[in-house]
């Protein structure tokens, strides 16, 4: 057995040293050939999973979490986040790419998503989170980058505070409060102007009302996004953010293009 720690200057020589003996070359060669063969099979569409498989998993994950409550939900640092882990991964990608000064979140819920966003901003070394909810919960996590605002996300008082907070900042917005269509559409119209060009306005839970979960919910975030985009050319759907097949925000990753 060989134990080796690669330090500065040793990385570029790794492949050459690994392949320096015939047994090693044969072992890695066979392994790589298997990967080439499997990649070719997938590229040809042979034996691949169907989109129905992703949809069934989507429904299983989302509806099971709702049925079983917080004990079944993803947690960040012990706090329920009420999000799809794939979406949280995408959020950190976006944060790293655009490096916002301020992330506005409507719908704090348990506070796990605000804490997650703040933790990623910690790693980036800058930025803060403003999280808005109609109810103040004493168990919300405390973090120096997070400010909680209590009130309706569309009330004049809260919108005035939001405008004060975002002045001069590079802004990203995540909407996850009341999921009824009229409320989400009101939020979209209120918060879209403060999103910085090149940044994102993310509408969560566009998967409800049969898209593919909760078919009996009625018009919700997905329908609100459809109507908003029909009248607003400043934003476009970024489908690349849905590349992990399961997202709770299908069609809801809106990038401001102008």
Image: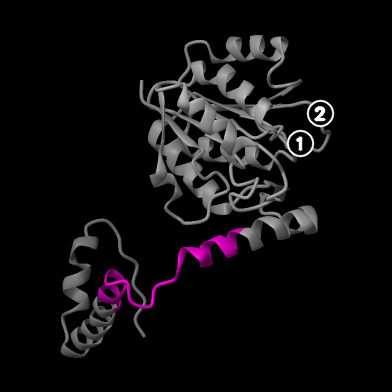
Q: Nearer the viewer, residue 42 or 218?
A: 218
Residue 218: in magenta span: no
Quadrant of the frame with the C terminus? top left
Q: Nearer the viewer, residue 2 or 106?
A: 106
Q: Residue at x 22, y 77 (%)?
A: 18
Q: Which mark is residue 16?
A: none
- On screen, residue 75 above or below 1: above
- On screen, residue 173 above or below 239: above
On screen, residue 163 versus residue 256, left or right, reads: right
Residues in magenta, as a range: 38-58
- On screen, residue 79 above or below 114: below
Q: Nearer the viewer, residue 13 or 130?
A: 130
Q: Secondary structure at mark 1?
A: loop
Q: Residue at x 65, y 9 (%)?
A: 160
Residue at the disc numbered 1: 140
Q: Are marks 1 and 2 in contact (CB under 8 Å)?
A: yes
Report crowding for label 2: few under 14, some 14 to 19, many 20 or more residues within 10 A (C-alpha).
some
User: Residue 60: horizontal and vertical position, in percent?
Assistant: 65, 63
User: Residue 199: horizontal and vertical position, in percent?
Assistant: 42, 28
Residue at the disc numbered 2: 136
Residue 39: in magenta span: yes
């Amino acid at each position: 057995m060989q134990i080796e720690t690669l330090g500065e200057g040793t990385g570029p020589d790794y492949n050459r040293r690994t392949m320096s003996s015939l047994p090693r070359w044969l072992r890695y060669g066979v392994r790589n050939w298997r990967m080439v063969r499997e990649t070719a099979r997938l590229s040809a569409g042979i034996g691949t999973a169907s989109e129905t498989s992703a949809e069934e998993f989507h429904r299983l994950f989302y509806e099971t979490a709702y049925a079983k409550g917080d004990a079944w939900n993803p947690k960040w640092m012990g706090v329920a986040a009420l999000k799809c882990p794939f979406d949280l991964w995408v959020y950190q990608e976006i944060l790293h790419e655009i490096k916002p000064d301020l992330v506005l979140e409507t719908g704090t819920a348990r506070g796990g998503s605000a804490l997650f966003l703040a933790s990623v901003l910690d790693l980036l070394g800058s930025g803060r989170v403003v999280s808005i909810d109609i109810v103040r919960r004493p168990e919300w996590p405390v973090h120096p980058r997070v400010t909680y605002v209590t009130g309706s996300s569309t009330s004049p008082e809260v919108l005035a505070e939001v405008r004060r907070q975002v002045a001069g900042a590079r802004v990203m917005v995540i909407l996850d409060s009341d999921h009824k269509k009229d409320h989400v559409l009101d939020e979209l119209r209120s918060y879209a102007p403060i999103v910085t060009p090149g940044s994102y306005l993310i509408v969560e839970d566009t998967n409800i009302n049969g898209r593919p979960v909760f078919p009996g919910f009625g018009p919700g975030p997905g329908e609100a996004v459809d109507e908003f985009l029909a009248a607003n050319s400043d934003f476009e759907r970024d489908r690349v953010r849905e590349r992990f097949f399961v997202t709770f925000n299908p069609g809801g990753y809106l990038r401001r293009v102008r």
